[in-house]
Amino acid sequence: MKRYLDELIENIKRLKIKRKAIILAHNYQLPEVQDIADYVGDSLGLSLTAGSTDAKVILFCGVRFMAETASILCSDKIVLLPDINAVCPMADMITADRLRELKKNNPEASVLSYINSSAEVKAESDVCCTSGNAVMLAHSLKDSRRIIFISDKYLANYVALKTNCNFITWDGYCPTHVKILAEDILIKRKSHPRAEVWVHPECRPEVISLADRVLSTGGMCKYAKETDSQEIIVGTEIGILHRLQKENPEKKFYPASEIAICPNMKLTTLDKILWALEDMRYKIDVPETVKFKAKRSVKRMLQLI
Ligand code: 13P
Ligand code: SF4
């Protein structure tokens, strides 16, 4: 088994050089996938890295909207998603048609869309945001017009609290983060009384109100290195614990809920990464007309931060 794994990793590394590829992985990916990646990060870090790489091929270990964002930002590159079924259910909770309807009913409003959305929805938006910069972007837009914030209602609720914005929202949510319950936090606090509680802004409001800090996954990785706290209860998808523990071996990290697992994030395996590089699949292509409009809203986010 060990020999198979070593050979698999060697073959991936060899093919990666041959294809002039870079491997990007989200913080929720399987440990062995994170360990082979050239860059591991949150949605913002991944977009920035995709936008600045000089690699010819971007192999995206994440979900479809992330690979689409890379394709939107880098027209000249081939973007590969090792498993075509790796999608984000939240991103699919709103379609471009439904958003157009919402815009028609609120013609005065600008659209701030969570990056967890399809390329078609991004093309209908004024600006995108990630969990790490949503508060800042809402602040920058709030004096102009009313804002339609799509599609995560819990992120919208958190940003509204922080900015005093009165958003027009959509009933979208992350099926993984809603599995983290307030009672989980209370139980974990009892078992680890010295631990701080950090949660992701996609969590339910009652979970957020019990937290010491609300952070994107990138924010958690950054703050884990800076904080004096030695124990942290982590309220997000459990894949991040691998990176947190690896980068901070002296600290202890506990999952707020053991069932907060995103099945789509776990579809990417080392075998599929090798096959993706061998067969150059699955290519993620966004139609040019959609790409042109979607690029404006993603670029606007990058200019405003
Ligand atoms: P971030 O890594 O940007 O915080 O997003 C979390 C998430 O759920 C991505 O799908
Ligand atoms: Fe989508 Fe939630 Fe999975 Fe992230 S964790 S990809 S928001 S379903």
Image (cartoon, grey):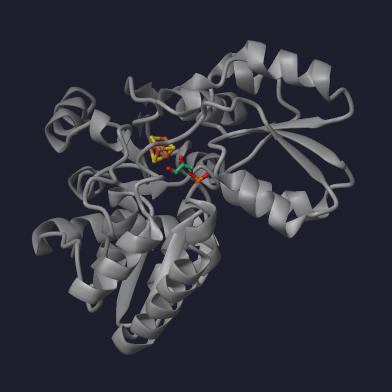
**Does the rendering let one see residue 202?**
yes
Expressed as whole percent of the image width and height from the top left, the position of residue 196 reads 80, 32
Expressed as whole percent of the image width and height from the top left, the position of residue 116 reads 36, 42
Expressed as whole percent of the image width and height from the top left, the position of residue 208 reads 63, 23
**Which quadrant of the structure image shows residue 58?**
bottom left
Q: Taking 237 as reference, is 289 left or right?
A: left
**Does the rendering let one see residue 37?**
no
Residues 288 and 167: in front is 288
Outermost residue toward the bottom in this view: 18
The residue that appears at 66% across and 46% down in the rendered structure is 220
Expressed as whole percent of the image width and height from the top left, the position of residue 213 reads 72, 33
The image quadrant where one finds ligand 2 is top left
**Position of 122 relative to 157 (above/below):** below
Residues 288 and 70: in front is 70
**Which quadrant of the structure image shows residue 225?**
bottom right
The residue that appears at 20% across and 26% down in the rendered structure is 102
Q: Taking 265 as reference, is 159 left or right?
A: right
**Position of 121 relative to 250 (above/below):** above
Q: Taking 245 as reference, is 182 left or right?
A: left
